[in-house]
Amino acid sequence: MNPKRSNAIWGFVFIAPQLIGLLAFSLIPLIAAFVLSTLDWDGFGAAAFIGIDNFTYAFKNPDFQKAMTNTLYFSVLTVPMGIFLSLLTAVALNNVRMRVVYRLFFFMPVVTSSVAVAIVWMWLLNGDFGIINVLLKLTFGIQGPQWLTDLHLVLPSLAIVSIWKGIGFNMVLFLAGLQGISKDYYEASMIDGATKNQQFWRITLPLLSPTTLFVTIIAVIDSFKVFDTAFVMTSGGPAKASYTMVYHLYELAFKNFQFGKSSAAAVVLFVIILFFTLLQTHLSRKWVHYAD
Amino acid sequence: MNTVKTEPVQALQKRTQHRAPHLKLDISKLVLHLVLIIVSTIMIAPFLWMVFSGLKDISQIFIVPPTLFPHPWYWENIHRSLTAMPFDKAYFNSAYISVSIVIGQLLTCSMAAYAFAKINFPMRNLLFIVFLSMLMVPEQVTIVPLYIILKNLGWLDTHLSLIVPDSLFSAFGVFLLRQFFLGIPRDLSESAYVDGANMWTIYWRIMIPLVKPALAALAIIAFLGTWNNFFRPVIFLSTTDNYTVPLMLSTFKGLYVTDWTLMMSGSTIAVLPVLLVYLLLQRYIIEGITMTGIKG
């Protein structure tokens, strides 16, 4: 057998399992999601083609609007604060002794099941007996709010949980980025008389920008996929105040069996996430400072 | 004589010169450590509160001011949680599902990655781009069609619905391992090829041992990702006996939502073994996740 043919056969043998998986469980489902979004189908009877009706319905649907604004608000609440705090802790940990011990603690929530995290925080944030409100009362004499049943506080409360859970992940990425900055820059600038402050703004931050961009985009995308905490802690309530995009498409598909409408919501979510992914590629070419 | 007299003076000057900034540095370091200790406490306090609340009697958790440690320790809660819900069953399910997926992914991803990196076959670049683009598709977007496919295969409410899709497809795994295979010099496989080894032998005997660190990183990420996944189990599984640990815990919460001691001991049971493994392997876990930038 000639080597070219042999290579072709071996190549396809090696990628066969993943290729089958790609087609059956990812590519075909993705195409199907677009097709389903144009259908009126409950999963059992006949499906009818209805064009863009599912999308026009979605944008008029108060549930969809609520889910969309809630998710955007959640994103605004979690991303900047999460990035800021994790960058701060990474810089603090960068040249400190026992870094490994602190890192161990900060990273613990990352490996913990989101369901367990949700349940524990339900207890911590409980309006009547939760330790947070009890401590507020004992130390400051303040009557703490109903964190999870107040219309205006429920999303900020979920945001706190999300930031707490994610800070360790962002932090280790920042730490890796900081370790990657050559010591030469700091030594050279020290000889030129730069202060610590100047070093941070002129060296650390610019050279860390690839990491910052990566972490930010991941955080934005993650915030759009929020589901577990809202599902377990509040069931999207009170009065849909913590109802999110993924919750919406979950409910449409698996509670109401409106597969077409759910797929339309999924397509919208996909377009948003795709936008941020492509933005990352674009921005990293344009703005980011790379050391070399 | 002169040198003997002047040397200690110079040394003293040196030491004093050095000591002043050193002392100042120590204070700022001390403050930094103090802040870090406080923040670390905030990070682990929820875990401690979970464990201690789970070992209190229901009357103890409403005491004002609250006590940190249970008095007396109420170990029966563990037993009560275990009998209230079949956590042992859920543990077994989660363990074998996650291990199956890890083994499946290591094998299929490394095979595909090896082919993409080292074998010249038609449409290789096009297919690789298709794999790469799938990185941009979150599981939430394809969940409905996937559900319909699994329903037609008759796999809903079986563990196949979780094991097979994840074992057979991970764009991330292929991408990660390909990067590592690309770093292996060509001479190595070519000399083996000249010696008469076929592709499979080269892949299995030469290539796989060389990418072990990457395989370990992928194994960790795949394990954490499937162990903690809630979205797919909550949609695909419906029989309690089939539940994974997070799904069991969520159901448990639905049933005992007012009994905080039971909920906390249940959460402790669900979380503690994973945390123990984390404490043992933390360096590898954190480094694996840092290396790849994926949470699992």
Image (spheres, coloured by chain):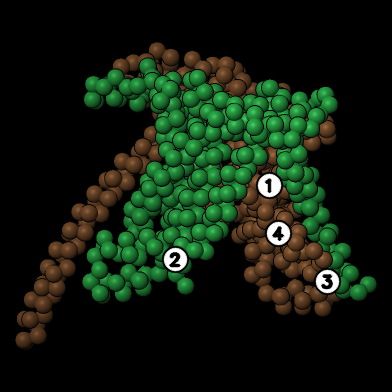
Chain colours: A green, B brown
Q: Residue at x 28, y 45 (%)?
A: B35
Q: Position of residue B132 (x, y in %)?
A: 67, 56
Quarter of the figure with residue A180:
bottom left
Tell me the quarter of the image containing the N terminus of chain A: bottom right
Q: Which is in the foreground here, disc 3 or disc 2?
A: 2
Tag 3's secondary structure? loop
| Dot 4 and dot 1 within a common chain | yes
Sequence-first disc among 3 and 4:
4
**Is residue A261 visible to us here?**
yes
Q: Residue at x 77, y 64 (%)?
A: B124
Tag 4's secondary structure? helix
User: Local crowd at mark 4 within 10 Å, few (<14), some, or many (≥20)?
Assistant: few
Query: How far apart are the two marked residues, 2 and 4, measured between alpha carbons?
Result: 26 Å
Q: Is residue A237 left or right of residue B166?
A: left
Sequence-first disc among 1 and 3:
1
Tag 2's secondary structure? loop
**Mark 3 chain:** B
Residue B129: image tag: 4
Tag 1's secondary structure? helix
Q: Residue at x 68, y 22 (%)?
A: A256
Q: Which residue is labeled 2 in the image?
A: A289
Q: Which is in the foreground here, disc 4 or disc 1?
A: 4
Query: How far apart are the two marked residues, 4 and 1, measured between alpha carbons?
Result: 24 Å
Q: Is residue A194 left or right of residue B224?
A: left
Q: Which residue is labeled 1 in the image?
A: B102
Q: Position of residue B15 (x, y in %)?
A: 14, 70
In this view, B134 is above or below B229:
below
